[in-house]
Image (tube, grey):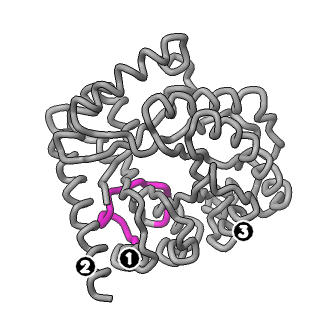
Amino acid sequence: MRISTETGSLIQKVGERRMIEILSQAGFQALDYTFSPFMEEGDSPWNGSGYKAHAREIAEIARDHGVVFNQAHAPFLFQLAVDEVPDYTRHILPLLARCLECASLLGIPHVVVHPLHNLRYRKFHDVVWKLNLDFYRSLASYAQEFGVKIALENMFQSDALRKTIVLDMLNDPNEYVSFYDELDDKEHFICLLDTGHSGLAGEDAADSIRILGPRLKALHVNDNCFTDDHHLIPYQGMIDWDRVLHALSDIGYRGDFTFEALHVWEHGDESFYPVQARYLYEVGQYMVQRIEQFKSKK
């Protein structure tokens, strides 16, 4: 099982080349390339006419350092009005199509695409469900064209009045299974679970893993204290990681072990980032070893 981590938060600190150097030297075999928030801001090399040359440059740097890009995160910071049905065909779809093409140029097998979730999920449940079926199906032709699968992700919402976190699209694991099965397109779509998102809306990551079962092909591994989307390194929050790792063992999970511990780079400077990267990788080694230990005891 390869150990991987997201890249966007470190790119913002040191740039792409140095990010690859730091993470590869720490031991990571694979990198989760983050296209957000760079593409939404409009001044990214991926947005301009030279995006293919940029892809060749980044791919070459990765090869030189012995790492691959195992997955990616698509743009998701769109300005959508709350409780309005978005016209995703005008602005969102073209940007995601470019993102899928760029991912293909980097040899990335699947890209995480958030569901459309500006509508309050419980109030507009049926509308949100249908909207997202149409949204994801509209992406299938691009996935086929560029040879890249699309990964769904469980989300959460914030109740502005009560100042609490509430259920959102794909967070209930039974609804996640129903939605994925209704898409009925295993050629172009896979299921990803964000461990931190699971707990925020009252679901349990270990239970979600077991319910998703063989549908689960990818992860965003991060911890939190169940009050906010903290994106902490595992064992720094309140998630029961033995339960999570047992569950991954029980379903025979065969995907990569990909961190999304965004805040690891918030403190220190470039001279300290390699230390943080090595620690994150060693946490990954420990967790993967635990999964294998649980498998061996069956």
Image quadrant containing the N terminus: bottom left
Q: Does residue 10 appear left or right of residue 120 in this picture?
A: left
**Residue designated by label 2:** 293
Q: Earlier in the sequence, mark 2 or mark 1?
A: 1
Give the crowd class for mark 3: few <14, some 14-19, many >=20 residues within 10 Å: few
Given the image, on which type of amino acid does mark 3 rest? Ser
Q: Type of residue at label 1?
A: Ser
- Could you tell me which secondary element the residue under label 3 belongs to? helix
Q: Residue at the location (64% across, 57% down)?
A: 186
The answer to whether residue 123 is magenta is no
Spatial CA span between label 2 and label 1: 9 Å
- Dot 2 alpha-carbon crowd within 10 angstroms: few under 14, some 14 to 19, many 20 or more: some
Q: Which mark is residue 249?
A: 1
In primary-sequence order, the first of circles 3 and 2 is 3
Question: 46 or 2, which lies in front?
Answer: 2
Q: Are marks 2 and 1 in contact (CB under 8 Å)?
A: no
163, above or below 109, in the image? below
The amino acid sitting under disc 2 is Gln
According to the picture, the residue beneath numbered tag 3 turns out to be: 178
In the image, residue 198 above or below residue 49: below
Q: Earlier in the sequence, mark 3 or mark 1?
A: 3
User: Can you give x and y, in whole percent of width and height, for residue 213 in the image?
Assistant: 53, 73
Please provide the residue range marked out in magenta.
226-240
